[in-house]
Amino acid sequence: MTMKRMLALLFALVMLVSAVSCGGPSLSSTGAGENPATAAETKEDAPPEKKYPTISHPLTKAEIDALPIANSSMTNEELRDLCVQYTTLMTSVVWTPSQSFRYECSYAGDADAAGYISISDGVRYGGLPYTSAASDLTPFMDLYDEKTGVLDVSKLGSNVGNVIGNNCATCVFWGWSRVSGSINYYGTVTMTQANGCLKLGPYTYDLTQTDFRTVGTGKICEQNGEQTMYESYALLRKADGVVMYNGGTTGHTRMVRENAQVVRNADGTIDGDKSTVKFVEQYSTQTSVQTEDGNVQFIGGMEREYTFKKLFSNHYIPFEIAELADSSKIQKGAVSLGLDKDTVTVEEVSNAKVQANYAISKTTVRVFEENGELAYENSAYGSAKGIGMQRTMEMSRILSAVNIRRNLKAGTKYKIEVQVRLGNGETITAYSGSVQA
């Protein structure tokens, strides 16, 4: 054997040993048709696994679904607990974003000069994002990893503010929606009787007015005086509310977390400095809190405490929800799509409207082949932005005739199911039948 051939053989053996020692595949481990170059990639060649901050107890859908559905046979205390529990879940869920993002929310206290809020990758946050989306936990949980606590915002881009999160009023709205079909978002802002709110306490204010914002809560507090307002605060129980509005964007709404603690002076009057109330609320300012996992930036508070004097000086007036004042008003969830035929056309489904007696959290359409195979699925989330949007949803938001025909074969009959999740936690089938494509 020539020296040249010996060197060539030695070089081949060295290359073979190197491939094996670096984790290179053996011939028996290479799949049929596999590209040897691809198969030989080492672990060092792969992109590094992304690390996220630890979250010991991510929220799960099972925890949410474990909350009972309100009914008129429940005790008043149980109903109040239910409202507070759901609101607390919204303000306490801990998460970390899959990537940094920013969204427009110009009225928020934490917005930058351009009207944007920024969320940073690698930071733990507590509570839903402060946005104008006016949503409950449903869209958030659809993006949330229940094992890691990572919120996947990659699919939303700059649309985050329109899909997940809420503000102070919509946060407590969804909490009250666990028991109330009469409350709406404007009720939590304007506290009018027509919107499901009742005046609480001896203070004077005509709730038949369409909107107290024309008066301002500061004027109401001033006209009634300190002790009258204190006596009204003294009646605050778990799941009642307080609201403040003094013009512009200076309004705020809170839900009571624990019954008011009242301390009276020797003459029977209330000591406003010592009497207190704890609230659960959402606000845009981030508060740094040390937890078992380390630092968490909480967007909202779960048990912030205020004195009666502070409530009065900040012009809050108390109210309660109609169903908490009279549990016989609590209804079982009901949904209608207005389709009373066994077989409908794509156009009839698309032109239909979901109507419910509770706020709509999410509506899902599923279309199946005759063999049961899923042919089409799409959903839309509810919003508390306007009275008309809370208990109604246009089906055209979910599917249009043009869009669905791209997924179905013309002239073919399919099975179709429309399911609606309500704010009280119920999921109801609004329609089940056949659809002609």
Image (cartoon, rainbow, N blue to C red):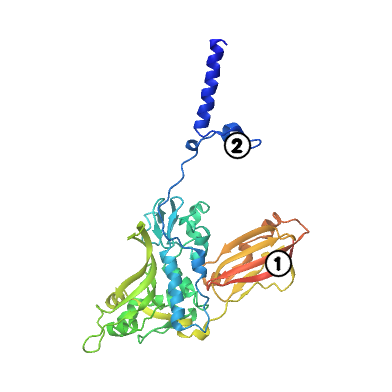
Left or right: where does residue 389 sit relative to residue 286?
right
Q: For residue 394, what is the image quadrant?
A: bottom right
Q: Is residue 153 above or below residue 21?
A: below
Q: Residue at x 39, y 84 (%)?
A: 200
Crowd rating for badge 2 (residues with CA inside 10 Å; few <14, some 14–19, many 20+): few
Q: Which quarter of the rendered picture does the C terminus lie within?
A: bottom right
For badge 2, the amino acid type reads Ser
Q: Nearer the viewer, residue 272 or 4?
A: 4
Count the labels in the image: 2
How crowded pointer 1 is (Cα within 10 Å; few <14, some 14-19, many 20+) is rated as some
- Compared across the picture, whether 71 is left or right of 121 comes to right
Q: Disc 1 or 2, which lies upstream in sequence?
A: 2
Q: Position of residue 425 (x, y in %)?
A: 53, 72
Residue 217 seen in the figure: yes
Q: Position of residue 152 (x, y in %)?
A: 49, 54
Q: Secondary structure at mark 2?
A: helix
The foreground one among 257 and 313 is 257
- Tell me which amino acid carries mark 1: Glu
Instruction: Tell me the number on the disc at residue 348.
Output: 1
Q: Is residue 208 visible?
A: no
Rendered location of residue 269, percent (x, y): 25, 87
According to the picture, the residue beneath numbered tag 2 turns out to be 29
In which quadrant of the rendered view does residue 103 lie?
Answer: bottom left
| Residue occupying image coordinates x 54% and y 12% | 4
Q: Is residue 153 above or below residue 77?
A: above
Residue 407 lies left or right of residue 167; in this view the side is: right
State the image coordinates of residue 178 (x, y, percent, origin top left): 50, 74
